[in-house]
Amino acid sequence: MKSRATGIFEMAMIRRVTHAYEETLALAAKFAKVLKRGDMVCLFGDLGSGKTAFVKGMAQGLNIAPEHVHSPTFTLMNIYEGKVPVYHFDLYRISVADLGGLGYEEFFYGNGITVVEWSERLEELLPKDHWHVTLTHAGDDKREIRVTVQGKSLKARLAKVKL
């Protein structure tokens, strides 16, 4: 099946529009192929914008069964074991002050890939180098997905992303 995902490549941003849940999963799976141990993916978007779906697609791209991925809204973090562990945080219900006692540094700067939903809540804890993924409703099942990076070390890798 041919993908209907469309978009443009800009200097420091990739923008795509997906037209169905399955396209969002496929796009995220492709994105995950460029991730490395120690990477942090910060997700931004309103409720229902597709953040957890994006994480499911990333898991698929990292050879982790997407059906194991669930939003950790009430548990704060899920760990998905694979070739590279994925640490999936959801900060919807907590503040930056709450993170201090959780030992977040072990995961944010650990040996896996960290994915954080509601990253805007990280404030000053947002790492200098990170992938910045914004998901926005674009009507019906459409989602606009914008990928940018923060930090010099990731800019070269962003240029290699083929979505």
Image: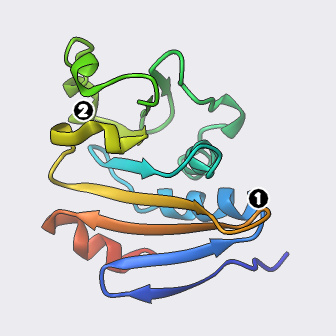
How far across and how far down the image is residue 47, in percent?
A: 59, 43
Residue at image point 33% right, 80% down = 159
How far across and how far down the image is residue 134, in percent?
A: 46, 60
Residue ranking furthest to the right: 1
How far across and how far down the image is residue 92, in percent?
A: 46, 30
Identified by mark 1, the residue type is Glu
SS for dot 2: loop
Identified by mark 2, the residue type is Gly
Question: Label 2, on which residue?
Answer: 110
Q: Quadrant of residue 67?
A: top right
**Dividing the image into 4 quarters, which one contains the N terminus?**
bottom right
Q: Quadrant of residue 28?
A: bottom right
Q: Is residue 163 above or below residue 136?
A: below
Q: Quadrant of residue 107?
A: top left
Residue ranking furthest to the top: 101
**Dividing the image into 4 quarters, which one contains the C terminus?**
bottom right
For the question of whether residue 52 can be seen, the reply is yes
Question: Label 1, on which residue?
Answer: 22
